[in-house]
Image (cartoon, rainbow, N blue to C red):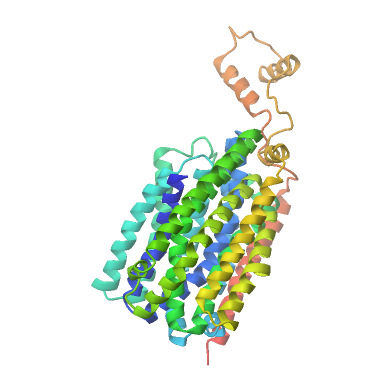
Amino acid sequence: AGPVVLAQLMIFLISVVSSIFCGHLGKVELDAVTLATSVVNVTGISVGTGLASACDTLMSQSFGGKNLKRVGIILQRGILILLLCCFPCWAVFINAERLLLLLKQDPEVSRIAQIYVMISIPALPAAFLFQLQTRYLQSQGIIMPQVIIGIAANVINVGMNALLLYALDLGVVGSAWANTTSQFFLSALLFLYVWWKKIHINTWGGWTRECFQEWGSYIHLAVPSMFMVCIEWWTFEVGTFLAGLINVTELGAQAIIYELVSVAYMVPLGFGVAASVQVGNALGAGDAEQARCSCTTVLLCASVCALTVGVLLTALKDVVAYIFTRDKNITSLVSRVMPIFAPFHLFDALAGACGGVLRGTGKQKIGALLNAIGYYVLGFPIGVSLMFAAKLGIIGLWSGLTVCVFFQALFYLLCILRTNWNGAAEQAQIRAGLKGSKDPTLTPTDQLNLEREVTDGVILPDIIRPESQTAQLMALEENQYVLPTIGEILTGRQLIFYRGTALALAIASLVAGILVRVFTGHK
């Protein structure tokens, strides 16, 4: 989990760097970048992250079941689906200013935020692709390339921010371009690393028509995965918008606290990723006991680390805000909210690790439902009531969110305690494209029939069998219980119709967004 934490931290630091640089330009610039980042996260990054999370289940279980080429096919399928999802996200991006004004945000802040969001449009497919690349590697237990490339991208990001903001005096525009360029560097450098080290050899069989099959089964996991991620993510982002309704001081403090909480969350997020991979690999291999042990270990480690981080940041409550701004009102408000952080982070970390276990077992629907209850039925209404009715501002908001994550963690733990691990292992092997037999050993009759197929009816003793036939026989034995495609196979005409319809709808959503921008842009 350690390298996963570092990898996630490197990715997150790219947006943090933008906030730090723009925070020193002024309060308006900090608020604009905060809102712009929220728009991009809510309507773009969170959607892609959620949809890519289906790979946490599908790839890890397929790799654990030794159906290696299927891992590459799932990656191809994810690339196509997520690229189509860019179109409706872009439709929202180009109308960001209108949305912010509808939410009663400051007009000048909204105008600057729109500029930042527009520059982020080309970064979205790169960010989506990187999400898929990381899951492709994580399912195989390969983490360090993400850490190395994340460090390189952050160095590039810091350098470009310094150059564009100060040397060229481009302000927020320069920071936006630095962020966008860094997203492309992340994806491109990771691709080059995989190609250079030939990591893809065993799992990538080249582009194939199989990637157009099974979209239904992918989306069946991807949509609940998206809601599982977005319900939580959107809650915190909406909190930022609500803080902006009070005043710029509350918004600035909320932005800083959210950044700190997000950085701290990298630790449990790393444990969650480790849980989804380890549990998924074990279930794909049919080892229910190993999956159970991995689950227990991850939950214990996440709890201990979260308690340590929570206590540390609470102890630094009076100084940590100065990393982002020197505004006395903002730093004072941050120090008053931080004592709530320790219990919040403990429950949030436990819930994050449990979420990884649920993704590894393919229980995203349950996770999405529990998130909806914890956040939108219990926690968030309490936070909003304390924020406005009780006039506690963001102190009330974070108090309500603490209640929220407590119930979320409780619901998750109860769900995991009731898990039938043997049943989960059987279901995982079906997803991995494995046939029902748990014992791949061939019977004498199967062996005889297999050899007849290989030698066209002439059975040769091992001592005189050609080497090529021996290799072919071994390949047949290894792949006898492996299926490239599961379920109904669509014909060519069906693929053209269904996938063509999906493409048309995606493009239509972008056109609709452009028309809204054109016809509502005149005051």
Residue nearest the viewer, comparing 360 with 173: 360
342 to the left or right of 28: right
**Number of numbered callouts drawn:** 0
Name which quarter of the figure residue 390 lies in. Answer: bottom right
Q: Residue at x 44, y 45 (%)?
A: 2
- Identify the residue at horizontal 69%, vertical 12% (top origin): 458
Q: Is residue 207 visible?
A: no
Percent position (x, y) of residue 253? 43, 75
- Going 60% across and 11% down the picture, which residue do you hit? 465
Q: Nearer the viewer, residue 472 or 164?
A: 164
**Most foreground residue, 447 or 392:** 392
* Residue 508 in the figure: left or right of residue 491: left
Q: Residue furthest bottom?
A: 523
Residue 59: where, in percent of width, then height? 59, 43
- Report if residue 291 is visible in the image: yes
Q: What residue occupies the far left of the structure in this picture?
A: 167
Return the x and y of residue 237 as percentages of the image width and height: 53, 70
* 193 over 510 or under it: above or below: above
Q: What percent of the width, then of the height, locates residue 449?
A: 73, 18
From what the image shows, is residue 11 above or below residue 201?
Answer: below
